[in-house]
């Protein structure tokens, strides 16, 4: 892009801007739409103007303008996948087959499979292999409209292998277009070698892994799988406080299966998000509602594990700030298709499509601490957006498991063109 060039995308049927910040309660259904919209951005990919096509046109009459035409289609901000495990090695299709025949997810983990199965494979993978696996996963995420993604470690469970995963994510951030935020999840499971001395593993995380991660600036957030039989609330607190000392904000798996007080503890620590919340209690909901912590809901996981769905409407009514994400991982939610996640959320949480989109754009940006720069289309933010092959937002969750993307723009550059549409 040349320095003085200005790009204007015009003839947008409805421009769903999601302007005005993260949303709660009834505001969740407001996409801040502009009919007959247009959007202008500069050579650096920063948005210069958003409005009706006449308003935007008037502003830049005499400049060096490159015009683009959306053909009456709708445009939204790029989708933000605020919870994924997109760097790991090895399929667990065999465990999927076992679960289809009735075996429980947590029983597979207790028997040494599950996360530990993926850790065996990830420890053996080379750094280059992990980058290439991650690249392929991100290519799929991007194809479905994801322009920013959060990626966790957590399949190394030993210092070098955890660092290898996070370095792979860092390489991907440099070498492919999707924006990435990284989360250190050394506390994803107790590795076999520490089964009889879990507190020693907690100490290794706090005194060995976290300082090493921080030293190389490999992560933005620190995560713990707080769950009965995995890490207790007390262990979680020790790890998250150690992370905070090194500038890693808590972003935590909790209340997924049995509520043990994870949400309450994490909100008190100022977590950027608490994720899953299938089993959140009324006390947890009250605590979350009174905070800036985002509840990140993962309906694809409920579906894939045949578990109940998080009480989303109850949380919306209570005033919680909520996001949606894929949780793409080899065990409990194997999908990059965030459009399908919108379908599951609409059906099983009882959401309006507008609510689901708010949760996967501006609120998801808040769930990774990026709501100042992405997640909505406003002057000064990044020109990250999707041109959808429809003039109606409802079509996207309604006609599920197909791809509605027409074009994807990140930082003002066309990065994906769906030839099928
Ligand atoms: O978010 N709950 C813990 N972690 C992941 C699953 C990881 C796996 O099974 O590999 C989750 O569901
Ligand atoms: Fe997860």
Image (cartoon, grey):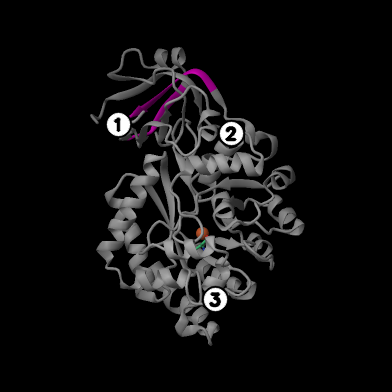
**Looking at the image, is mark 2 or mark 3 earlier in the sequence?**
3
For the C terminus, the image quarter is top left
Return the x and y of residue 107 as percentages of the image width and height. 57, 72
Return the x and y of residue 363 as percentages of the image width and height. 56, 43
For the N terminus, the image quarter is top left
In what element is the residue under mark 1? Answer: loop
The mark closer to the camera, 2 or 3, is: 3
In what element is the residue under mark 3? Answer: helix
- 247 to the left or right of 128: right
- What residue is at 44 percent from the left and 60 percent from the top? 330
Spatial CA distance of label 2 from label 3 is 38 Å
Return the x and y of residue 358 as percentages of the image width and height. 57, 37
**Pointer 2 with pointer 3, Cβ within 8 A:** no
Residue holding disc 2: 353
- 80 to the left or right of 419: right
Q: Which mark is residue 43?
A: 1
Residue count near mark 1 (Cα–Cα under 10 Å), binned few <14, some 14–19, many ≥20: some
Task: Report if residue 360 lies within the magenta region.
Answer: no
Does residue 288 lie above or below 371 as drawn?
A: below
Residue holding disc 3: 110
Return the x and y of residue 120 as percentages of the image width and height. 38, 73
| Boundaries of the magenta span | 34-50
Q: Which quarter of the figure has residue 406?
A: top left
- 6 to the left or right of 74: left
**Pointer 1 with pointer 2, Cβ within 8 A:** no
**Looking at the image, is mark 1 or mark 3 earlier in the sequence?**
1
Residue count near mark 3 (Cα–Cα under 10 Å), binned few <14, some 14–19, many ≥20: some
Q: Is residue 247 visible?
A: no
Q: Which mark is residue 377?
A: none
**Pointer 1 with pointer 3, Cβ within 8 A:** no
- What residue is at 30 percent from the left and 31 percent from the top? 43
């Amino acid at each position: 892009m040349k320095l003085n060039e200005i790009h204007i995308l015009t003839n947008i049927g409805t421009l769903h801007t999601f302007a005005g910040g993260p949303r709660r309660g009834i505001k969740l259904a407001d996409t801040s739409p502009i009919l007959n919209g247009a959007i202008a951005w500069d050579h650096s990919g920063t948005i210069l103007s958003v409005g009706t096509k006449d308003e935007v046109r008037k502003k830049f009459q005499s400049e060096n303008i490159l015009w683009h035409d959306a053909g009456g289609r709708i445009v939204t901000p790029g989708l933000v996948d605020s919870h994924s495990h997109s760097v790991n090695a090895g399929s667990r299709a065999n465990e999927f087959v076992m679960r289809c025949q009735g075996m429980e997810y947590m029983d597979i983990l207790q028997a040494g499979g599950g996360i530990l199965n993926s850790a065996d494979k990830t420890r053996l993978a080379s750094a280059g292999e992990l980058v290439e696996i991650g690249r392929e996963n991100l290519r799929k995420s991007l194809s479905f409209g994801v322009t920013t993604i959060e990626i966790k470690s957590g399949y190394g469970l030993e210092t070098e292998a955890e660092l290898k995963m996070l370095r792979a994510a860092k390489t991907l951030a440099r070498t492919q277009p999707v924006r990435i935020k990284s989360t250190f999840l050394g506390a994803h499971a107790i590795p076999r070698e520490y089964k009889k001395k879990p507190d020693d593993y907690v100490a290794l995380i706090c005194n060995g892994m976290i300082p090493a991660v921080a030293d190389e600036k490999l992560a933005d957030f620190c995560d713990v799988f707080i769950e009965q039989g995995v890490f207790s609330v007390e262990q979680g607190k020790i790890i998250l406080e150690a992370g905070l000392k090194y500038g890693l904000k808590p972003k935590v798996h909790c209340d997924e299966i049995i509520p043990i007080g994870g949400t309450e503890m994490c909100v008190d620590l100022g977590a950027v998000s608490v994720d899953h919340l299938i089993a959140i209690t009324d006390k947890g909901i009250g605590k979350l509602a009174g905070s800036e912590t985002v509840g990140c809901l993962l309906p694809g996981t409920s579906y894939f594990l045949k578990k109940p769905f998080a009480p989303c409407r109850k949380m919306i009514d209570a005033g919680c700030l909520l996001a949606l994400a894929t949780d793409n991982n080899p065990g409990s939610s194997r999908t990059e298709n965030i459009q399908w996640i919108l379908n599951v959320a609409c059906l099983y949480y009882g959401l309006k499509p507008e609510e689901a989109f708010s949760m996967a754009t501006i609120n998801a940006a808040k769930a990774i601490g990026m709501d100042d720069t992405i997640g909505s289309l406003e002057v000064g933010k990044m020109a990250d957006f999707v041109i959808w092959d429809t003039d109606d937002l409802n079509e996207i969750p309604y006609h599920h498991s197909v791809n509605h993307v027409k074009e994807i723009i990140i930082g003002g550059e066309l990065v994906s063109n769906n030839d099928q549409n």
